Amino acid sequence: MTGPSERVRVRGLPVGDHALLLEVDTGEAALALHAELLRRAGARTLPAVREIVPAARTVLLDGVADPRRLAAEVARWDIPPSADGHGATVEIPVRYDGPDLADVAELWGVAPQEVARIHSGTEFHVAFCGFAPGFGYLTGLPERCRVPRRATPRTRVPAGSVALAGPYTGVYPRSSPGGWQLIGTTDAVLWDTARDPAALLSPGTRVRFVPQRPLREETSA
């Protein structure tokens, strides 16, 4: 994470007349910037904005009266490190039965049941959302656990698939094509328009995956 002695460098790019894209160097800095924007918006010290949308290394502010002036103001901020998520932890039940579990185990150099232990023992945080309604990009796994996308994407990934790609974990909210490594499945509903809010996950939310049954000990990589 960004340490207290490291100043977050923010570059502002006006987008049209009433939006501002704030760009930083790392995902950790984006989390810290997003948290500071939310804090200032809650304290009413941030000029009025319609929407604050985080991404991997940017935060988009929409509905800004004077984007260039706000960009200059944000560039002068001292942005503290981001806290590890906010609010209650969302628990997602998962069966570690994905078709790519053995491949991920081989990449990690462990047995498949150890992939389940490491993954379920990690507290994740939603860095940002995108790709499909309800899809959150979750960070938390150590760098050594990063895995590449599949060389050949699947034409159909079932809804509820728990997957890994690069530094992220995600859960497919609906059936769709995808190239992430599938390690498990869940019955959790990630997007429900009858629910308020419709999305189970939002940026900053803590997430834990709870195994629904142990892997068989005889399973191996």
Image: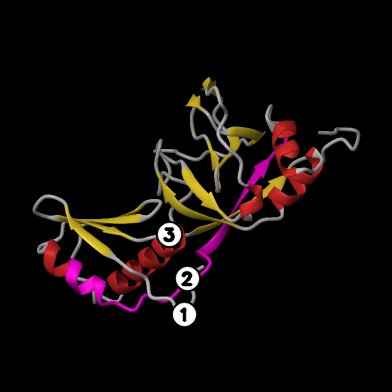
- Residue ID for mark 2: 2
Marks 2,3: beta carbons within 8 A: yes
- Between the C-alphas of marks 2 and 1, the distance is 7 Å
Q: Position of residue 91 (x, y in %)?
A: 62, 51
Marks 2,1: beta carbons within 8 A: no
Q: Quadrant of the C terminus?
A: top right
Q: 129 and 220: which one is in front?
A: 220
Q: Residues within 10 Å of mark 3 (few under 14, many from 20)?
A: some
Q: Is residue 31 above or below residue 209?
A: below
Total marks shown come to 3
Q: Residue at x 75, y 36 (%)?
A: 106
Q: Residues within 10 Å of mark 2 (few under 14, many from 20)?
A: some
Q: Secondary structure at mark 2?
A: loop
Residue 94, picture quadrant: top right
Kind of residue sitting beneath label 3: Thr
* Magenta-drawn stretch contains 161: no
- Between the C-alphas of marks 2 and 3, the distance is 9 Å
Q: Secondary structure at mark 3?
A: loop
User: What range of the chain is rendered magenta?
Assistant: 71-96
